[in-house]
């Protein structure tokens, strides 16, 4: 088993990860934007619908926190999704002023079509990747995110 890297080596290697993530993120964004024209589903609405599909009904603040978006942005996406019949706002027994956002059957069909397309595209990734490699990748990314959240919190950015 490998030993943990010393802080300086870890910093250098994580910097490589950040450099690699940039182009991957931008390419994914371009593909999603291109597919948006054919699916008619804006990226922000897609994110809201996917979250609701995965986690069930949520409030706008909960949706915003989970994706690190502003509440105002998520509120606009929820309104757009509601206008298209993809979500409905229902009373929240835990909070009178913050409605729950619930995906509709139309919204579920829309997000399932988009995620099916994404699944097909992700299936094209080669490299004979293993489950253990993907688990390690996710572990690293989660640690990076947690460290960044800690830094933001310490700076009062949140």
Image (spheres, rainbow, N blue to C red):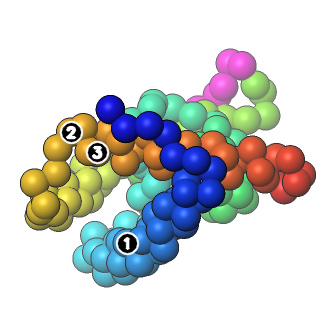
In this orientation, which residue lies closer to the viewer: 73 or 10?
10
Residue at which label 1 appears = 24
Gap between marks 1 and 2 measured at Cα: 20 Å
Residue in the image at 19% along x and 59% along y: 122
**Position of 116 compared to 95: left or right?**
left
Query: Is mark 1 in CB contact (under 8 Å) with mark 2?
Result: no
Query: Is mark 2 in CB contact (under 8 Å) with mark 3?
Result: yes
Magenta includes 90?
A: yes
Q: Position of residue 36 (x, y in %)?
A: 34, 74
**Position of 121 compared to 99: left or right?**
left
Vertical position of residue 25 compared to residue 78: above or below: below
Specify which label sits upstream in the sequence, 3 or 1. Answer: 1
Mark carried by residue 91:
none
* Residue 124, quarter of picture: bottom left
Residue in the image at 46% along x and 55% along y: 47
Q: Nearer the viewer, mark 3 or mark 1?
A: 3
In this orientation, which residue lies closer to the viewer: 83 or 142?
142
Q: What range of the chain is rendered magenta?
A: 88-94
**Position of 103 compared to 124: left or right?**
right
Residue in the image at 31% along x and 52% along y: 111
Secondary structure state at the residue bearing disc 3: helix
Residue at which label 2 appears = 131
Secondary structure state at the residue bearing disc 1: helix
Q: Position of residue 92 (x, y in %)?
A: 66, 25
Vertical position of residue 141 compared to residue 70: above or below: above
Residue most extreme to the top: 93
């Amino acid at each position: 088993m490998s030993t943990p890297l010393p802080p300086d080596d870890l910093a250098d290697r994580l910097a490589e990860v950040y450099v690699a993530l940039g182009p991957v993120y931008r390419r994914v964004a371009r593909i999603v934007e291109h597919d948006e024209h054919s699916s008619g589903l804006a990226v922000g609405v897609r994110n809201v619908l996917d979250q609701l599909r995965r986690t069930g009904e949520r409030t706008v603040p909960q949706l915003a926190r989970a994706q690190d978006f502003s509440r105002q942005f998520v509120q606009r996406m929820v309104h757009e999704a509601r206008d298209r019949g993809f979500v409905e706002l229902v009373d929240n027994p835990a909070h009178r002023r913050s409605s729950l956002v619930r995906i509709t059957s139309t919204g579920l069909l829309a997000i399932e079509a988009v995620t099916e397309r994404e699944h097909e595209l992700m299936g094209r990734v080669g490299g004979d990747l293993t489950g253990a490699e993907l688990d390690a990748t996710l572990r690293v990314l989660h640690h990076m995110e947690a460290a960044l959240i800690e830094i933001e919190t310490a700076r009062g950015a949140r």
